[in-house]
Image: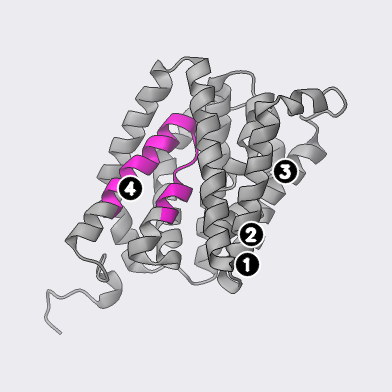
Amino acid sequence: MDAFTLPAAWLPYTAIGPWETGFVFLIYAAGFFIRGAFGFGSNMPIVLLTTWVLGPHHAIFLVAVTAAVAQVHLFPAGVKTADWGIARPMFIGMLIGTACGTWMLSRLDAEWLTLTMGGLITMIVIIDRYHLLERLSERINLRARPVTASLALTSGVLGSVSGGGGIYFMAPYLKLVCPTPTALRGTNLVLSGLFMMGRIVFIALLGLLTPNLFIETLLLLPAVALGIWAGTRFFRTATPERFYAALQLLLAMAAVVLMLKGAKKIF
C-alpha cells in the first residue's frame, strides 16, 4: 500500500460521483435550514432524498452523525429557551424509545412503521388544524408526566426506525403546551439533541459507525452551517402566525411523504 493511500474505510463518498456528492451537500443545506428555523426536521427530508444516491442505511447513519455534531452548536440556544416543565419528563421516554427503535432498525424492515408514522402525523395535523387538542385539554392535563412520557417513548421508537425523526410526531402537541414560538423551538432543540445523541450511542453500541461516516460529516459541516444560519434568520424575522403556518405545512408534507414511502415499499 502507498504511504499516502488511505484505507477504504476512511475514504468518503467512494460509491458516488461528483454530481451525486454535490446533490448530497445541497440537500444537507436545505435540511438544516429546516432545523435552524424550527429546532427539528432536518433528518427526514435528508434521509428520503439522499437515499437515492447513498442507499438507505448509509443515508440514515450519516444524518445521525451529522445531526448530532450540528446539535452541539444548537443545543445551548435550546437550553436557554426550552420549556423544561415539558422537556424534562420526556427524557427517559425518548431514551428508551430511541434504544428500542435503533435495535429494530438493525433487525427489521421499516416500511410498516414508516407508513404508521405518516398516518399518525396526518392524524395529529388534522387534530391541530381543527383545534381538537385544545378541547381534549379541558378533560386531560396534557402536561401530566404519564402523557408526556408515553408520547416521548412512542416518538423515540417511530423516529429511530423510520429515520424520520421523532419530533415530527410530537410537534403539534409541543406547539400547544409551549407558550411561545421561542419556547417551542427551544424545546424542540433540546429534545432533538437528546434524540440525536441517544441514536449515536446506540448505533455505536451496535457497531454500525465507521471512520468514513465521521470524515463525510466533517466535509458536510460548511453546508450544515449555512443551512442553520439561514433557518435561524427565518425564525428571527417570522411572525408567530407565519411560523406556525410554516410548521403546519412542514408537518403535512412530512406525513404525505412518509405514507407514500411506506406504501410504495409495501404495495
**Separation of disc 2 and disc 4 at Cα?**
24 Å
**Separation of disc 1 and disc 3 at Cα?**
18 Å
Find out whether the residues at labels 3 and 4 contact each other: C-beta distance under 8 Å: no
Q: Is residue 133 above or below residue 120?
A: above
Mark 4: secondary structure: helix
Please state the extent of the stretch shown in magenta in the rendering: 24-48
The residue wearing badge 4 is: 27
> Where does the image place residue 148, in percent across and percent down from the top left?
74, 38
Query: Badge 4: how crowded within 10 Å, few (<14), some, or many (20+)?
Result: many
Label 2 or label 4, whichever comes before in sequence order: 4
Find out whether the residues at labels 1 and 4 contact each other: C-beta distance under 8 Å: no
Label ID, residue 80: none
Label ID, residue 151: 3
Q: Quadrant of residue 191?
A: top right
Find out whether the residues at labels 3 and 2 contact each other: C-beta distance under 8 Å: no
The residue wearing badge 2 is: 113
> Where does the image place residue 245, in percent across and percent down from the top left?
52, 24
Label 1 or label 4, whichever comes before in sequence order: 4
> Where does the image place residue 188, in percent across and percent down from the top left?
55, 35
**Separation of disc 3 and disc 4 at Cα?**
29 Å
Q: Residue at x 27, y 50 (%)?
A: 25
**Separation of disc 3 and disc 2 at Cα?**
16 Å
Q: Is residue 160 above or below residue 122?
A: below
